[in-house]
Image: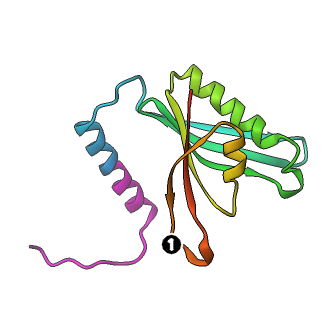
Amino acid sequence: MREVSVKVGMTEDEIEYIKNQLFQFNVSTAPPDQGALSKDINLIIKDEVKIYGGLMGKIYRGCLFIEFLWISEEERSAGYGQKLMMEAEKIGISEQCRFIHLDTFSFQAPGFYKKNGYEIFGVLEGYSDGIKRYYLKKDL
């Protein structure tokens, strides 16, 4: 075995290299079953002055993963989150996704997702102060 060291931190080039190597391995061992390997989904709600919210996700292997959903605090009851989720679902359907999945912490929005038809399929416990991480999905 070679003598190597573990270092904290990476350059942007090193990060991209490692991501690309894993991506290439995944493609070579589990080829995609449809179309493009992945596609970014980025939705934003804004006017001429202000950003009120946004959603970022990725379509891969016939599903849509929601990575980020944020609504400005003063606008959280205005329906913007639901509007973004509905648009993401439309995109998922048009891209022939079978389901959407995401995760959220107990202090974030598990109730919002459940109210919008998402079901919990896993819970990770053990965080400090009793916080839980919920894994949810919705069939399309």
Q: Residue at x 35, y 25 (%)?
A: 33
Q: Nearer the viewer, residue 116 or 58?
A: 116
Chain part drawn in magenta? 1-20
Q: Look at the picture and state if 75 lies above or below 125.
A: above
The answer to whether 14 appears left or right of 4 in the picture is right
Q: Which residue is mark 1?
A: 126
Residue 85, horizontal then vertical, whole percent: 69, 37
Asked if residue 45 lies left or right of residue 57, the reply is right
Q: Residue at 53%, 39% (x, y): give it.
A: 58
| Mark 1 closeness class: few <14, some 14–19, many ≥20 residues within 10 Å | few
Residue type beneath disc 1? Gly
**Colour pattern of the rendering:** rainbow
* In the image, residue 35 above or below residue 1: above
Quarter of the picture containing the N terminus is bottom left
The vertical placement of 133 against 64, above or below, is below
8 magenta-colored: yes
